[in-house]
Amino acid sequence: MNIPPKNLLCAVDFSSHSSGAGRIGADLSRRFGSRLHIFHTVCTPSSQVYGNPVSERGRTQENQVRHARQAIDALMSGLDYPWTPLIAFGDPVEALLEAADQTDADLVIAAGYGIQGVQRFLHGTVVERMIRTLACSFLVIPPHGAAFRPDGGLKASHIIAACGAGGDISDRLLIHALSYADLFGARLDLLHVMESPTNGAMPDDPPGHYAVTEAAFMENRRRQILSRIPREIQDRRNLSILLESGVPGEVLAESARERGADLIIVGVRPRRFWGRILKGSTTETTLRNAPCPVLAIPERAGGEGTDA
């Protein structure tokens, strides 16, 4: 995983949200000096009898590719950064995985739709499936959630990065958070959300009164987070450690909304299917409620850092 990323893969579906993803892809590629691929999947349902791809409404695959290329050209019109089109057929997640491998992508960018309720319960969303499967970073752009500067580039003057269970923040997540803060000259808040004051070690000598005990516990947790940060960074300007109580994904999204954050950074780990449906995750809750783009950083298997 490269910082800065060398290869960006921007997935578009030609919806009204794709234009924002394309602009952000061009802007980040320019800032990082990265190669940019604009990717689209043409969904081709299979024949129930033979299992082979069926052309949509009688159109040949050649026509579908031509129409997709024209749509990509129109989408990227006016963005003066070199890009390469990449068009595939099949399931969006499987095709994106192949494209990410083919382009050696370090960062994938896509628009999200925030599907709720039973539909999400039964099927999930394409973005949530992608974010659980990709081995590289994934930037999700929620509908109407990205802010742009007057010059058309992505605005990210305030970034919130999520610390995980126990206040841990992985080296991988911290490196990304600091790199993006430097890239945009942004304020960076490291946010840890405690579901209850009993989650973790209490002070050795609790003061007694609940409010005082909770305050002492939160200060103890703040010091734990600070100890994970290199000493030369601890006194860094525009770096803060925030502690909140509640449901992590909900509090993370609400804190971003209240503080006017432009970007949320979270860690993500693979989760077994039933555990994900029954328990959900910080990452998925954040995605469904985020008021701004969310950058998901994959953690090492079984590994460190945020409880996503």
Image (tube, rainbow, N blue to C red):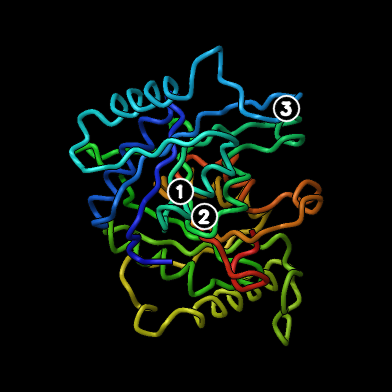
Q: Secondary structure at mark 2?
A: strand
Q: Secondary structure at mark 3?
A: loop
The amino acid type of the residue labelled 3 equals Tyr
Residue 130 pos. (x, y %): 58, 46
Separation of marks 2 and 3 at Cα, in angstroms: 39 Å
User: The N terminus is located in which quarter?
Assistant: bottom left
108 and 226: which is toward the camera? 108
Q: Residues within 10 Å of mark 2 (few under 14, many from 20)?
A: many
Q: Nearer the viewer, mark 2 or mark 3?
A: 3
273 and 118: which is toward the camera? 273
Q: Which mark is residue 139?
A: 1
Disc 3 to disc 1: CB gap under 8 Å: no
What residue does disc 3 label? 50
Residue lying farthest to the top in this orientation:
57
Q: Which quadrant of the view contains residue 86?
A: top left
Disc 1 to disc 2: CB gap under 8 Å: yes
Q: Which quadrant of the view contains residue 15?
A: top left
Q: Residue at x 48, y 36 (%)?
A: 88
Q: Residue at x 35, y 44 (%)?
A: 37
What residue does disc 2 label? 296
Q: Is residue 88 left or right of 72 when viewed as pictured?
A: right
Q: Residue at x 28, y 31 (%)?
A: 76
279 and 14: which is toward the camera? 14
Separation of marks 3 and 1 at Cα, in angstroms: 37 Å
